[in-house]
Image (cartoon, rainbow, N blue to C red):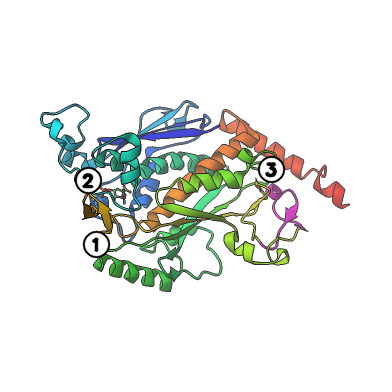
Amino acid sequence: MIRFTTAGESHGKALVAIVDGIPAGMPLLASDIDTQLRRRMFGYGRGARMKIEEDAAEILSGVRAGETLGSPIALLIPNKDWENWTDIMAAEPLEGDSEGRRRKVLRPRPGHADLVGVLKYGRKDARDVLERASARETAARVGCGAVCRKLLGELGVAVGSHVVEIGSIRSDVQSLPDDINSAADESPVRCLDPEASAAMVSLIDNAKKKGDTLGGIAEVVVTGLMVGLGSYVSWDRKLDGRLAQALMSIHGVKGVEIGLGFEGARKHGSEVHDEIERGGEPRMGGFNRPTNRAGGLEGGVTNGQPLVLRAAMKPISTLMRPLNTVNLATGEVAKAQSERSDVTAVPAMGVIAEAMAAFIIADALLEKVGGDNMVDIKTNIASYIARLNSGSVGAETVE
Ligand code: EPS
């Protein structure tokens, strides 16, 4: 129903994105997108690039007078750093190109796409690879995700995230605030536990001093969803699988959990499954759960409880005290290239994971209720929820 694609190199002129399938009649302003782009730029541990950029989107199509038209929405996010890279990144051939351009990357970083990229695409300079493999691309994803988030917001669905681990430090929060993002955005690492937040900041300072990097885990929580998004009938329609793929596609993400995740595998069934009781909100179909260990998904279908997803990111592969590698030009042992980079980008990854989750959920929502415009979508949701609560499923079986 909804699809998006992005283009752009990290130090090219701009990132571009097209989101297709957004219904007509949805309010959308560039500022809705810019708010999310700015959130992605924050986070203690980010490098100098984020001091150069002021990410903002220009809406090139699909919106008129502040409302979507139902046509593809094209976004342009300029790279301010481009002016420092015009000769290195120029699309046109330049004099001297036969010797290769400035800022070649010949010592591939272990863990980055550098080596696999040059081998697969037959390039001599890993700059040809890293420019696209860079997490800079995630700015475009967050732009597309912001459009999907706007759609969800109009339908009462909220997407938030917070950082639960950086390196060895774990956040300890017993309950989540209603507005997770306003609370998390107050912390320099987007962590809701103030003690853990301070410990994460000093761990990042230490890693920076040592020329090292850190990974971590962010949790995405989606509230306000109705039962019935996704399906159990075929592998590729299961919403858990679709969400996992979307989160795993984020740069540096090596693992995804839903609900209890891996922890559930270590427990007995009686400690894992959420008992069923009557009650809950109408969007839950008349049934409630006292616990949410499933993370809002059963059989690949939403059950109306909050979706709880976690993405684990490995430490960034650009180390200021680099690991061993091989020089691609000479074949000799070398230290890997050190480019300007971040010590950690886990706080930003949480915002990107929100964007990817928003896209998958908005897509699944339109798949469930259809609709080319907001009025039809709202009518269809109301009629679905009325059917869920009409007694044809719940009440009759129970009485
Ligand atoms: C990023 C932009 C990049 C990096 C980072 C994420 O900018 P630059 O390469 O100019 O410093 O800060 O990307 C990486 C860590 C990476 O390995 O590619 C951004 O906009 O998020």
Going by the numbered disc 2, the residue's amino acid type is Leu
Q: Quadrant of the N terminus?
A: top right
Residue 6 pos. (x, y %): 39, 35
The residue mark sitting in front, 1 or 3, is 1
**Residue at image location 71% in from the left, 55% down from the top:** 280
Going by the numbered disc 1, the residue's amino acid type is Arg
Q: Is residue 318 left or right of residue 301?
A: left
> Nearer the N terminus, badge 1 or badge 2?
2
The residue mark sitting in front, 3 or 2, is 2
Q: Is residue 259 left or right of residue 203?
A: right
The residue labelled by disc 3 is: 232
Quick one: label 1, few (<14), some, or many (20+) residues within 10 Å?
some
Residue 51 lies in the magenta stretch:
no
The residue labelled by disc 1 is: 321
Residue 278 lies in the magenta stretch:
yes
Instruction: State how many labels appear.
Output: 3
The residue labelled by disc 2 is: 106
Residue 42 pos. (x, y %): 34, 55
- Front residue of 70/260: it is 260
Residue 154 visible somewhere in the drawing: no
Q: Secondary structure at mark 3?
A: loop
> Nearer the N terminus, badge 3 or badge 2?
2
Q: CA distance from mark 1 to mark 2?
A: 17 Å
Q: CA distance from mark 3 to mark 2?
A: 47 Å
The answer to which quarter of the image holds residue 229 is top right
Q: Which mark is residue 183?
A: none
Magenta region, residue range: 277-291
Residue 252 pos. (x, y %): 40, 52
Residue 99 against residue 55 in the figure, above or below: above
